[in-house]
Amino acid sequence: MTGMELDKKRIVVKVGTSSITAENGEANLRQMDILCRTISGVQSLGYDIILVSSGAISVGANKMRLAQKPKEVRMKQAAAAVGQCELMHLYDRFFAEYGKITGQILVTSDDIEGAGSRENLTNTFDALLENRIIPIVNENDSVSHNEIQSEKMLFSDNDMLSAIVAVFCRAATLVVLTDIDGLYDANPAVDQGARLISRVERIDDGIRTLAKGTSTNRGTGGMISKLDAAEYAMEHGVDMFITNGKTPEKLYDIVDHKIVGTLFAGKKV
């Protein structure tokens, strides 16, 4: 995959659980609307957009009226099944308001690793994008427990999934929307003097040390998992941005080549 030319008009957007749900796990309709409106607007500028969305387990647990987010794998898988239906219903309605069509793609590690399934998946992505349809991607949690149980499987969480999808689909840019503005030189939760790092050329031990102790409120991945995803993306030439999901409109600034959040610059391949 490293030898393939990247498409500068193709962008993968990953949205974390904390960016599209409320504290109680219910879908945050206001934020979802802003996200869908922004993605629709950027697509209308001539870009191909792929959305990797977390949140299924959280939304499903809320809809099932569970007292708390489930801990058993089988209950997480049940919540994912319920929540994925709800998320797709909402995404489909919001995108339709802006004249856009969506398609759902649920993947497992086998889909990426198997030669035959990989070809089929590539054809599906290409066909959707050629027809100006926005693919909405998640790991198939109801049949695969990689994301919800394992620490170091292929995907680990949707941060790595989004990087793999970006490389897989030859996207030049990956934008990770989370509940923090980017990578800081100290933990901003405890250090008011923490400064945002606008650009990272290489992920080394020093950069990884900065990420320790930072995490999202309700997602599975903290900054460490985002650095893993960034390293994978960078190795394959993909530029990855981390920015705050409360302001998805920053996507316009990214396509206008403005400084946004933290850019992990892809290597020239």
Image: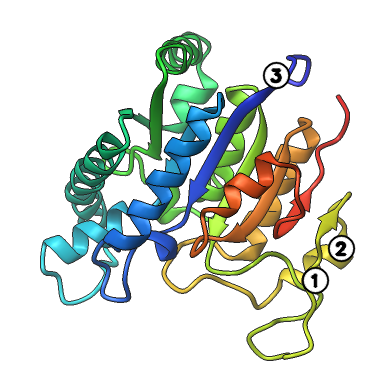
Location of mark 2 (residue): 205
Toward which corner of the image does residue 34 lie, by quadrant? bottom left
Q: Position of residue 25 (x, y in %)?
A: 27, 68
Q: Answer with mark 2 or mark 3, whichever residue precedes in sequence.
A: 3
Residue identifier under label 1: 209
Q: Which amino acid type is shown beneath numbered disc 2?
A: Asp
Query: Which amino acid, mark 3?
Result: Met
Q: Spatial distance from mark 2 to mark 3, Cα to Cα?
A: 26 Å
Q: Which mark is residue 1?
A: 3
Q: How many marks?
A: 3
Q: Nearer the viewer, residue 120 or 172?
A: 172
Badge 2 crowding class, 10 Å Cα cut-off, few under 14, some 14 to 19, many 20 or more, is few
The quadrant of the image that shows the N terminus is top right
Q: Which of pointers 1 and 3 lies earlier in the amino acid sequence?
A: 3
230 relative to 42 in the view: left or right: right
Q: Which residue shows up at 49% across the image and 65% down it?
A: 246
Rendered-image quadrant of the C terminus: top right
